[in-house]
Amino acid sequence: MVIAPIEKPKYALSQTAWNAHNGDGFFFVEKNKVPEPVKKALKARYGGAYVYLLGDETHISNKVKRELAKYGYVQRIPGGENMYNQAVSFATYKDVGKNFSWWFSKKSRDFGWGITQPGHNFIFVNPDNWQIAVASSLLSHKGKHGPMLLVYKNSIPENLKDYLYNVKPSYISSQEISNNHGWIIGSSDYISDGNQIKIDRFLESERS
């Protein structure tokens, strides 16, 4: 289950792609308060929940984190100091382990994209165009499944540059290459033509 700050709803943009891909539960909370409907939903779960917070303690307080811990295991996804870094952290984050079981079967925990190598798809959006960004999350279910990454109109955040460089494909031969793919969401009013070229260069393979 993913929790985002209602006062900063754009923090939830990267989560929309994961929700479309995997269907995990999602709620908003206030910085210093867990709304009653959220408490009710958590109480209704069978067994403890695994809860992942978007945003650091300036967006979701430690008081709220402790309150949520009454309903299960809680941890913050790193990079919550801003929404751009949070999206990068969400793309790399992975949490696996036990979840729950019943007498004839079991369901393991497998949360997060965990993408740290080339050969994947990415959705690039400007959070100022959040309505279109939310709609584009469907590409993580019906398209080439992959995380949503946030960019500015005319530039790429530094943390995202580092990430894209780390997962940049290396060209060995035409038979041995894992290409990356990218969806640019929105018009050039939100992601300029020049910035689209920059993104494409980060996605292209690089000869060793």
Image: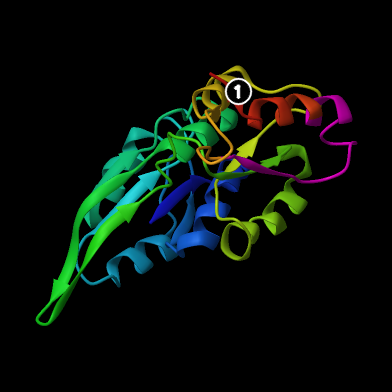
- Foreground pick, 113 / 70: 113
Under circle 1, the secondary element is strand
Q: Which residues are magenta?
A: 179-196
Residue at image position (77%, 46%) is 185
- Name the residue rendered at 64%, 58% in the picture: 139
Residue 51 lies, in percent from the top left, at: 33, 51
Q: Say which of 125 and 167 sits in front.
A: 167
Q: What is the tally of numbered marks visible in this picture? A: 1
Assess whether residue 181 is covered by the magenta stretch.
yes
Q: Report the side of 76 relative to 143 (left or right).
A: left
Q: Residue at x 65, y 35 (%)?
A: 150
Whether residue 60 can be seen here: no
Q: Is residue 138 magenta?
A: no
Residue 119 at least partly seen: yes
In this picture, residue 150 sits left or right of residue 11: right
106, above or below 114, in the image: below
Q: Nearer the viewer, residue 118 or 62?
A: 118
- Compared to residue 25, the image places residue 12 above or below, namely above
Q: How is the image coloured?
A: rainbow
Does residue 65 appear to the left or right of 208 in the view shown?
left
Residue 189: % across, % down: 90, 36
Label 1 Cα crowd, 10 Å radius (few <14 / some 14-19 / many 20+): few
Three-letter amino acid code at the position of disc 1: Glu
Q: Position of residue 75 (x, y in %)?
A: 30, 40
Residue 46's spot in the image, x, y percent? 23, 72
Which corner quadrant holds the N terminus? bottom left
Pointer 1: what residue?
206
Residue extending farthest to the left is: 103
Residue at x-position 53% and y-position 41%: 175
